[in-house]
Image (cartoon, rainbow, N blue to C red):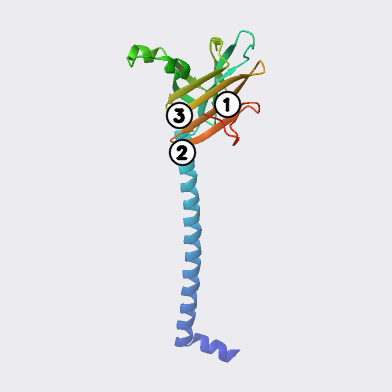
Amino acid sequence: MRAMLQLLLSPPGLILIGVILAAIGAFLASQQQGNFERELRAKSEEIAGLNREITNLVTGGDSFCYLAIGSIDSKTNRGIPIVLHQGEHPLFDINVRIVDLQKLREIKDNTWTSFSQAQTNLPVGNLAKGTGLTMDPFDLGSSTGRDFNIFFIARNGQFTQKLRLRKINDKWVRATKIERDGKVIFEKIDIDFPKSNEGNVQW
């Protein structure tokens, strides 16, 4: 034991002790630096997440809305249009352009006045999460099928809806599809809505 102590207190021993202490210090510093960098990375990701959430709250994020026509009376063919919000964030500055495809097909000349008769513009405004905006009753007419293409513009961009309605056995059924940037983001089809032999809706 005494010989070991003398060896450690000798110049080579002191050098060895210094090397060991330096290695331990470097290891502890490395561990502390690694912990600091992990904490810093976690904080940066948290701040980035908060910034994204703030941006989404201001712009609307990935939220969208669509037009539904509910409570359709099978005798009068009148229903209540409602714009329904979908998503986690509110929507702002919503404007809607509804194109009546039946009226569009009936147009004989290519004038703007004729085209405008097949379109309806609606300033919806803002929609909070999970809410809807009802409008005046809408008459579907005497036809047993109505087709609408609906174009939405909001603060978070543009999205398009295809709304198809069919009267089957004295009951109106619906199919709707929402697309954004060429991708389908929402689809809702009543079980009784007519489909092709392949089981697809003819949009």
Please tell me which of labels 2 and 1 falls first in the chain. Answer: 2
Q: Residues within 10 Å of mark 1 (few under 14, many from 20)?
A: many
Q: Examine the rendering and report whether any part of residue 187 can be seen.
A: yes
Q: Which residue lies under the disc numbered 2?
A: 52
Marks 2 and 1, Cα distance to the nearest angstrom? Answer: 33 Å
Residue 162 is situated, as x and y percent measured from the top left of the image, at 50, 26
Would you place residue 110 above or below residue 31 in this image?
above
| Viewer-closest of 6 and 189 | 189
Q: Which is in the foreground here, disc 2 or disc 3?
A: 3
Q: Residue 184, percent across and down?
A: 50, 35
User: Mark 3: which secondary structure?
Assistant: strand
Q: Earlier in the sequence, mark 3 or mark 1?
A: 3
Residue identifier under label 1: 175
Q: Residue furthest bottom?
A: 3
Say what secondary structure mark 1 lies in: strand
Q: x, y percentage for residue 133?
A: 54, 17
Q: Residue at x 42, y 17 (%)?
A: 104
Horizontal relation, residue 180 to residue 199: left or right: left
The secondary element bearing badge 2 is classed as: helix
Residue with the mark numbered 3:
159
Q: Amino acid at mark 2?
A: Arg
Mark 3, mark 1: which one is toward the viewer? Answer: 1
| Depth order, front residue of 99/178 | 99
Q: Are marks 3 and 1 in contact (CB under 8 Å)?
A: no
